[in-house]
């Protein structure tokens, strides 16, 4: 995947399609507890649950092994046509 460089006009045009979640004390605390050893991954996973995401797209092999986190399904970013420009 190519790194996205900011500012990215194409992403800015689509910002309303994203759920932006504030990093709360609860998310930060839960992230220290897991489910992985990678704090940043945990923040993303707990944030996806906090916003009620049904799908979490990633290219991280360790996260893909989880399959689900709560009710959030973890899928390969390659499984969606919407992310083709990032491959």
Image: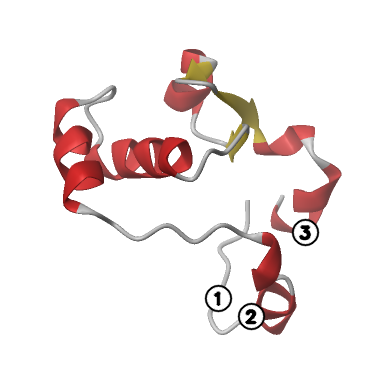
The answer to whether 52 appears left or right of 10 in the picture is left
Mark 1 to mark 3 CA distance (whole Å): 13 Å
Q: Left or right of 19: which side holds 40? A: left
- From the image, tell me which residue sits under label 2: 8
- SS state under label 1: loop
**Residue drawn at point x = 16 percent, y = 51 percent:** 25
Q: Nearer the viewer, residue 14 or 21?
A: 21
Q: Which mark is residue 85?
A: 3
Q: Residue at x 49, y 15 (%)?
A: 65
Report x, y in % for residue 56.
57, 36
Mark 2 and mark 3 lie on one chain; the one further toward the N terminus is: 2
Answer yes or no: do the residues labelled 2 and 1 have beta carbons within 8 Å? yes
Which SS class for mark 2?
Answer: loop
In space, the residues marked 2 and 3 are separated at their CA atoms by 12 Å
Q: CA distance from mark 2 to mark 1?
A: 6 Å
**What is the total number of numbered labels drawn onto the structure image?**
3
User: Mark 1 = which residue?
Assistant: 5
- Picture residue at 54% right of the left edge, 15% below the top: 67
């Amino acid at each position: 995947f190519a790194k996205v460089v900011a500012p990215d006009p194409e992403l800015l045009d689509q910002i309303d399609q994203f759920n932006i979640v504030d990093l709360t004390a609860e998310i930060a605390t839960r992230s220290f507890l897991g489910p992985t050893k990678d704090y940043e991954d945990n923040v993303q996973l707990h944030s996806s649950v906090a916003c009620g995401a049904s799908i979490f797209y990633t290219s991280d092999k360790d996260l893909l092994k989880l399959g689900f986190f709560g009710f959030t399904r973890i899928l390969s970013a390659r499984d969606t046509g919407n992310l083709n420009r990032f491959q």
